[in-house]
Image: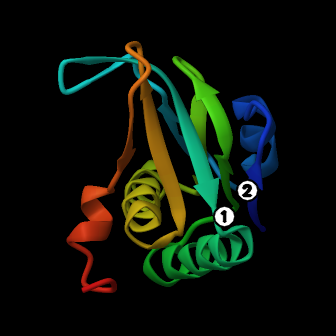
Amino acid sequence: MDHVDIIEDVIKVEKLVDLVTSPSYGAITTFIGTTRDNFDGKNVTRLEYEAYIPMARKKMLEICGMVREKWKVGNIAIVHRIGVVPVKEASIIIAISSAHRRESLESVHFAIDTLKATVPIWKKEIYEDGSNSWKENTEWKHSKING
């Protein structure tokens, strides 16, 4: 089962873990990307995300397919948050189950890197002094897919 979504609400890790849990799989790996309170010496108060939702969902499903081509995994759940994401809250959670730990660990690593490189989701950092900056993903910039 592949579950992908883009939401404006708080992402519940327990819900995603429940989606990927199965009696047939003994390993579940999660990645939780949260808003940190600093970047490059500036105090960050929040992040704001925008997405081209139809294309983002399509790309997220493609990532699920790529994971399945490379590893024998069970269930995959990828949820990204858009809108305002305060410090310490999750902007993305990925959960993948597999029979053994290696597949789930490696596939989650691949999934987040590929998502950052290919999915049309944009992040703006808002700083304590009121200034802001749109951030470019290093993975996107150096992706073979995007030039």
Q: Quadrant of the N terminus?
A: bottom right
Task: Identify which amino acid the numbered label 1 is placed on.
Answer: Gly
Q: Which residue is mark 1?
A: 74
Question: How dense is the environment of label 2, judged by Cα within 10 Å: few (below 14), some, or many (20 and up)?
Answer: few
Q: Quadrant of the C terminus?
A: bottom left
Instruction: Looking at the picture, tell me which residue is in the foreground, 38 or 76.
Output: 38
Numbered badge on residue 25: none
Residue 128 appears left or right of 82: left
Q: Position of residue 80 (x, y in %)?
A: 64, 49
Q: Does the residue at mark 1 contact the one at mark 2 (Cβ under 8 Å)?
A: yes
Q: Is residue 17 above or below residue 120?
A: above
> In the image, what residue occupies the spot 54% across and 74% down?
63
Q: Position of residue 30 (x, y in %)?
A: 54, 41
> In the image, what residue occupies the spot 53% across and 72% down?
72
Q: Is residue 132 above or below residue 140?
A: above
Numbered badge on residue 24: 2
Instruction: Looking at the picture, tell me which residue is in the foreground, 129 or 57.
Output: 129
> In the image, what residue occupies the spot 46% across and 54% down?
108
Task: Identify which amino acid the numbered label 2 is placed on.
Answer: Ser
Q: Is residue 78 above or below residue 133?
A: below
Question: How dense is the environment of label 1, judged by Cα within 10 Å: few (below 14), some, or many (20 and up)?
Answer: many
Residue 34 appears left or right of 44: right
Q: Position of residue 57 (x, y in %)?
A: 70, 71
Q: Quadrant of residue 137?
A: bottom left
